[in-house]
Structures are given as structure tokens and as C-alpha cells.
Image (cartoon, rainbow, N blue to C red):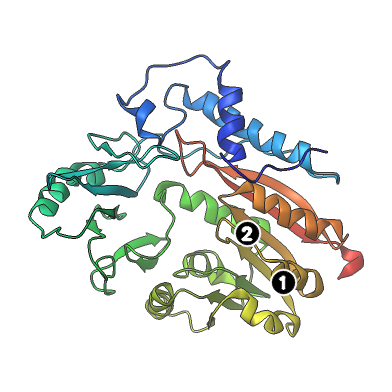
Amino acid sequence: MKKIKRKGEPFLRKKGEELSRDIPKVESSCSIHDSCGGCSYLEISYENELILKGQVLAELWKDNVAFEVPVWEPVVPSPNEFRHRSKLSLQLKRMRDGSVVLGTSPFGSKEVIPFSRCPVVMEGVETVVPEVLEGLKGRNLEGIKRACIVIRESQDKKVDWGGLGRGSLNRSVEESQVYSHAGMEVRYDLKGFFQSNLSILPKLFEELMNSLGVDEHCTFVDLYGGVGLFSIMVGHKAKSILMIEENPDSLEFAHYNREINTMAKMKILRGRVEDHLETFRAGDGRWVAVIDPPRAGMTSEVRQTLLEASQFEKLAYLSCNPETQLRDVKELCASGKWKVIKLLPFDFFPKSYHIESLAILERVENFS
């Protein structure tokens, strides 16, 4: 059995580049994609891109899984092949002559490629870049060599940016961006984490509700809750909601989002997931959970608790890093207490090698 490589380029990038060599090429929609480093698949059709990403995930699991798992389902496509990214992070570099360059950095490089246009970001994000650059030129940049500038466009086309100076990404709830779906809304700012592809979110919400069987008899658990997106959009049909988040900025928005959606049944716990493991061990009834951790995945303490806490019936593990997701799922299933019942990728990042992978796990009856 092959070992998962942890150093250097990610498995998804390396394997994707290897498999894409034999795929017929199409004309790229970007003149600088070779040097930019942001997109991997501008020269293959979207149909072939989806097939390729499915193959890469299948190979990762085939080479590293010794237990039985279902076949990966076809990748759920993004409704928008282009113009799907609502967030753009650009590198500001102040040159020795005092001039300013604003652009992207290739993978593993400190070089900054001046931004011209980008076919994968939402139109408002692309349009505002020259304005941002002009605004930066008017600032006092003495002592600043580099900075990260964040530009974000919300569902209602509101464009905001920041990143120069302490607190420049912070926004009050009145100034924040809004995502709405099915009569509910969630607010977020430039600083906290929020999904970048807004167009594919409704497909994900539907899949999570159906796969977990969220209803008025269960407790919905959101282990890395952020601003409360899944708690509100997926967990609203549950009897009760338990959300955990450690980031103070995200917590402020989570509390606000709970209030504006009148989610009195939503309990928000402050801190790391590891700080609240006793809450899991003391739980009863039927629990279902969404797990959307950072790229590092879950810690061994969290995995062990999910093995011990028998009230958990189903887990929906969503990950932007299939390698750490696989590590975590392997440990849960090796115990015999959990089994994978569905594997489904979502293409949150068309034209990039990145992919969001969803694994649905169900507790084995003998251990309930």
C-alpha cells in the first residue's frame, strides 16, 4: 500500500497534472495562466475537468484504503464554470523605487505577477482591482514591503476590500456581506472564513440535509461552525443545534446570525472542538454532524471522541484537503464503528486543481 506524500506539492496537483497530459487541450481564456499559478485546468474542457478530478480522488482512495468503500459518485459541477470565485487575495509588493505592484504569486514563489484580469473571479471583484490599486497608491506605504489585499463580492454584488493595516478586514454587522437562501440569511466579513463559490452552496445544502436525514427528532452538530452557515442553512429543521467555533470574529457573526434567523434552539460553544469533547460524551438522543475542518483535518482527540460518542448516527465530512480527510476517515472506519456510505465531490473551484470532497459516514448498528 502506497504512503500518502505529505511534503512538496499536494497530491491533487501532482496527480492532476500527470493525468491531464493526455487530455485534449482547448484555448485558454487567460493570457497569463502559465505564470499566475492560480488555475490548473484552463486548457481543458469543463466536462473533462470534472472527469479528471473524479479520477484523482478515486486514485487517492484506491492507493490508501484497505476497507470497502462505495465508488466515488460523479463530481457535482459548479453552476458557474467561470466567474465563480467571490473572494480574491492579491499580493501587494512595494518596490525599491516606491512603486506598487498588486497581483498573484505562483505556487512556491515570492514573485508577484501584476493583475490584469481573471476569468474565474466574479465580475465585480475583477472590475474593482484598478480602483483598489489607485487607492493603495494614495496611501502612506512607508515601512510596508508586502501585504495581502482581500477583495470580496457578496451575493447582492456588493464589493468590499481591505488588508492594509491592523483591523482593515474587520467589518461591523451593518457593513458586512450577506448570503441568503430559502428565506434565511448569513452575514460575514472579509476576515473570517466563508465559502468562495456561492453558486454551488444550494446543491451542497440539499445533499447534506438529505444524507444526514436532518429532522425534528435529531440534534444537528456543527463541529467547526464558522459564522454558522451550516447550522442555519442545514440544521434549521433539527430539534436542536450545537455549534462550536474558536475564532472570535466568526463567533461574533455567528451570534448575530442566530438572532436574525430567530434560531433560539441554536447553542454556540466558544473554543476549540477539543475543549468540548465532554459535551459529546454526555450527549443522548440521535445526533448528526457536519465536519468542515481546516486543511489539517481533525485531531486524534476529536477522532477518538467520535468513536466513543455513540449518539452520533451520521457524519458528513466536507474537506478541501482530501488527504487529511482520508486519514481521519480511515481511523474512524478501522475501528469497525463507522462505515462510509457515500463519497461525493463538489467542484467549488473550477479551473483549479482544488476540490471539496464529501464523505458520508454512518455508525455501524452493532456499536450503537
Kindly identify which residue carries mark 2. 297
SS for dot 1: helix
Q: Which quadrant is the N terminus positioned in? A: top right
x and y, in percent, of residue 368 in the image:
86, 71
Residue type at the position of mark 2: Gly
Determine which of the numbered discs, if any, sits on residue 278 in the image. Answer: none
Within 10 angstroms of label 1, few (less than 14), some, or many (20 or more) residues? Answer: few
At horizontal 69% and vertical 46% (from top left) the residue drawn is 343
With respect to residue 34, does 104 lie above or below?
Answer: below
Q: Give coordinates of residue 66: x percent, y percent.
A: 85, 44
Res 345 → quadrant: top right
- Residue type at the position of mark 1: Glu
Residue in front for this viewpoint, 286 or 357: 357
State left or right for residue 160 relative to residue 341: left
Residue lying at 64% horizontally and 33% vertically, measured from the top left: 56
Position of residue 60 measured from the top left corner of the image (x, y, whole percent): 70, 38
Residue 102 located left or right of residue 334: left
Q: CA distance from mark 1 to mark 2?
A: 12 Å
Badge 2 element: loop
Q: Residue at x 56, y 55 (%)?
A: 295
Q: How many marks?
A: 2
Query: Which residue is pictured at 15% across the width and 47% down the height?
Result: 133
Disc number for residue 301: 1
